[in-house]
Image (tube, rainbow, N blue to C red):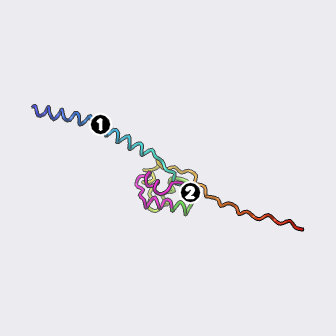
């Protein structure tokens, strides 16, 4: 009978320690889930870090597709990238932002020499 009391008394502190730890992990997980990524401006490393089930190769493929085809108009267009399926898009829909593409850097206009006055 006494051994049962000892087991129960050791379980109480364990529960009181585990509960806050689990709660902290759940809260940390939801904080990560709230991070968003603009698929029209982000680099491959950011895309890989923020999106679930997107590794380095798929992130690079997203950036390459964007460079070749222009800005994404919707998250659903990610399905056009090889290796990215509709399930992956749905899993990440709350993390994906489709903002304006980064403006292209314009080349400064070459200055023309002033026309010489005609005599």
Magenta stretch mostly in which secondary structure? helix
- Pick whichever, 116 or 50, lies toward us: 116
Tally the marks. Answer: 2
Q: Is residue 24 magenta?
A: no
Q: Quadrant of residue 110?
A: bottom right
Name of the residue lying farthest toward the left: 1
**Placement of the C terminus among the 4 image quadrants:** bottom right
In the rendered image, residue 39, in percent from the top left (x then y), is placed at 51, 54
Tag in front: 1 or 2: 1
Q: Nearer the viewer, residue 98 or 10?
A: 10
Q: How packed is label 2: few (under 14 Cα within 10 Å), some, or many (20 or more)?
A: some
When the figure is inspected, residue 31 is found, relative to residue 90, above or below; the finding is: above
What residue sits 16% from the left and 35% below the top? 7
Quarter where residue 83 is shown: bottom left
User: Residue 5's mark?
Assistant: none
CA–CA distance in space, label 1 to label 2: 45 Å
Residue at 42 percent of width and 59 percent of height: 56
* Residue pictured at 31% horizontal, 40% vertical: 22
- The magenta region covers 41-63
- Kindly identify which residue carries mark 1: 19
Q: Earlier in the sequence, mark 1 or mark 2?
A: 1
Q: Position of residue 2 (x, y in %)?
A: 10, 31
* Secondary element type, mark 1: helix
Q: Residues within 10 Å of mark 1 (few under 14, many from 20)?
A: few
Residue that badge 2 annotates: 71
Is 115 on the left or on the right of 31, as rendered? right
Residue 106 placement, left or right of 48: right
Which quadrant holds the N terminus? top left
């Amino acid at each position: 009978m006494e051994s049962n009391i000892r087991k129960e008394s050791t379980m109480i502190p364990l529960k009181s320690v585990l509960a806050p730890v689990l709660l902290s992990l759940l809260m940390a997980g939801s904080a990560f889930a709230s991070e968003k990524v603009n698929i029209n401006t982000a680099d491959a490393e950011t895309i890989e870090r923020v999106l679930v089930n997107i590794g380095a190769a798929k992130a690079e493929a997203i950036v390459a597709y964007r460079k070749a085809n222009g800005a994404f108009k919707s998250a659903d267009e990610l399905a056009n990238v090889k290796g990215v399926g509709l399930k992956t898009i749905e899993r990440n829909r709350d993390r994906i932002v489709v903002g304006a593409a980064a403006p292209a850097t314009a080349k400064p206009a070459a200055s023309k020499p002033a026309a010489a006055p005609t005599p």
